[in-house]
Image: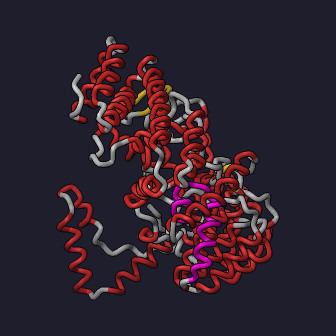
Amino acid sequence: MKKLTLKEFISALKTRLEKYTHEEIKEIILAQGIAMSPRERIQFLDGFVLPEKKERKKKGQKTKEDDDLLLNEIEAFGKRVAKYEFTTGWGWDNEYGEERAWGDDSWVGEVDDLFGRIQEFYEAGNYEIARKAFESLLEIYRGGMEEGKFSGYDQDEMIETDIDEAALKYLRCIYLTEIPSERPQAIWDALSGLSFDARDINIHGLINVSTEELSQLEDFGQQWREFLKKQKVSALSTNLLKEAVRLFQGAKGLETLAMEEGGKFPSAFVEWLEALKKEKKYEEMIRAASLGLERLPDRLLIRAKIADYLHAAALKLNRKDLIDRSLKEALFADPSLERLLDLLDNARNLEERIKILNEALPRFQMVQKKRGGERAWDLNRSPDFFEREIPGNLELQIYLLKGDYEKAEAQMEKSKSLGWSSGEDPGALGTPFFLFSKWDHGKKLAANLSELWKEATSPGPFVYHDYDGDWDEGEDPKERPEPTKAEARFRNYLEGVLKEIPLPESEGEEYFRRAEKIILNRIDAIVGNKHRKSYWKAAQLLLAVAEVYWSNGQTMEGQKLIDRIKEKYRHHSAFRSELRAKAKKSGIFSL
């Protein structure tokens, strides 16, 4: 859930208060009171008092002894943390369902008390001491969490202090105490220790964590941008630079950054496009996206995001040529079944679909041979330069979608008996496909094959990923594709291909036998090695094969197969139990 800074909250609250009349505000308050639990009512009533008007305390009101006492107590607390005084080690927590640090939770109250006392210095305007205290305590707290020196398993939830807000106040203290020329370096040094991507702790937060205006902010903005451009490109420097341009220069600045330094900061194009989208400048979006796609290397994942903006603008302007181009660019930058299906959806007929698949296949095969680039799991790298690897099962999916059954069957030679859960093994899709293709489609699919077919052809939640793996917080969820429609989409395509390009009977029999052999090897691997949690998978596969025999009028063949495996594993009672359950669901065979 997005958190609001104090300034954002007060601004939003004032806007809402101004929206309603005095009587309407009373109605809102009464409705909230009625909805409260008995325990909350007294505390709610106690809040209805006018706040005392306080004058800002002068720095001199805090004595040197007060300063030293706070800093010394933080130092002493840090020494106790370093000695693992608050933890006795790690162990399993049945309630939490994972391992966590056990020990003395009294650190929670101490941390909150120390942060509360730092807050008093902060509110009194004693930013020098608040800065030192925040820096020391944040380092102790974050280090203690990372090194398992505090008991518990979600320390941020255990304490009342909002750590991100404390960090923002620390950054504000740096701004208020550092000489202007040294501010960028000091804030950069602090931010480098607080965040790897500046997603929650950033300059926007520094500015808005208080309702008071900061002096010399425009001058700082210019210094900050120039400073960030000189830093090594990383997730942190890139995100902070984009934020700085957005805050201090707006859409025009984002355009300039993209045009002049887009090669160094590719996501500047995304920021520029988002600004244009908010202003509904669709022609400009097409120009900006086209420039980004023209200038950026063709394997960068971020190109898919740029292509998505091009697609959105092309749809608004009904530019079919650009719709085709945007879908193709998105697929080549972000290879996936989902992107491929989007492109196929835009084709008018089977011939166009085959053309698309024939163009995509050699490109993906070439990319697979040239493994390299900065992968999306290198978190220290700038996400602007991530590349998406080709999914291991995409080649098989393409062969099946184009009706090249011979090459699809050849892919199954790579199949291993275990490790199908990720869907990457060719057997996970290939065997259900060739079972389904052998089915007599004059009959309704039997239970086990039906489940197996749905599982194999459901790619999971149909979610596009931004170049950094997340949706923008401001993005409209309605614009995301519908998962339920997409899960059936691949299955519908495959079933349609089998009608458009029928599998010859002799080849269908051959490929079915090949699939059966792979399945029996998998059953042996699962049951023979006592992978009990996967016994249901082995039973489902066996019954699915038997059901195919039944659909083709060979019920006895299916029964013999079941009996043979049942006898082979007659001492595996758990597996036999799964077999009985699957057979009961099928309603065809007896055990």
Instruction: Determine whether 488 is above or below 262 in the image.
Output: above
Residue in the image at 26% along x and 86% along y: 22
Instruction: Determine whether 263 is above or below 580 in the image.
Output: below
Q: Count of labels shown?
A: 0
Residue placed most toward the observer, 454 or 430: 430
With 531 as the anchor, is 412 left or right in this view? right
Specify whether residue 336 is painted magenta. Answer: yes
Image coords of residue 561 (percent x, y): 35, 23
Image coords of residue 123 (percent x, y): 53, 65
Residue in the image at 45% along x and 72% along y: 9
- Quarter of image, res 58: bottom right
Quadrant placement of the N terminus: bottom left
User: Would you say residue 94 is visible in this rendering?
Assistant: no
- Quarter of image, res 223: bottom right
Residue placed most toward the observer, 289 or 211: 289
Image coords of residue 219 (percent x, y): 74, 78
In the image, the segment drawn in magenta is: 319-344
Image coords of residue 552 (percent x, y): 32, 37
Specify whether residue 55 is painted magenta. Answer: no
User: Would you say residue 282 is visible in this rendering?
Assistant: yes
- Quarter of image, res 541: top left
Residue in the image at 70% along x and 60% along y: 300
Residue placed most toward the observer, 334 or 77: 334
Quadrant placement of the C terminus: top left
With 534 as the anchor, is 301 left or right in this view? right
With 46 as the anchor, is 267 left or right in this view? right
Instruction: Determine whether 257 is above or below 89 in the image.
Output: below
Decide whether the magenta segment is chiefly helix, strand or loop: helix
With 48 as the anchor, is 121 left or right in this view? right
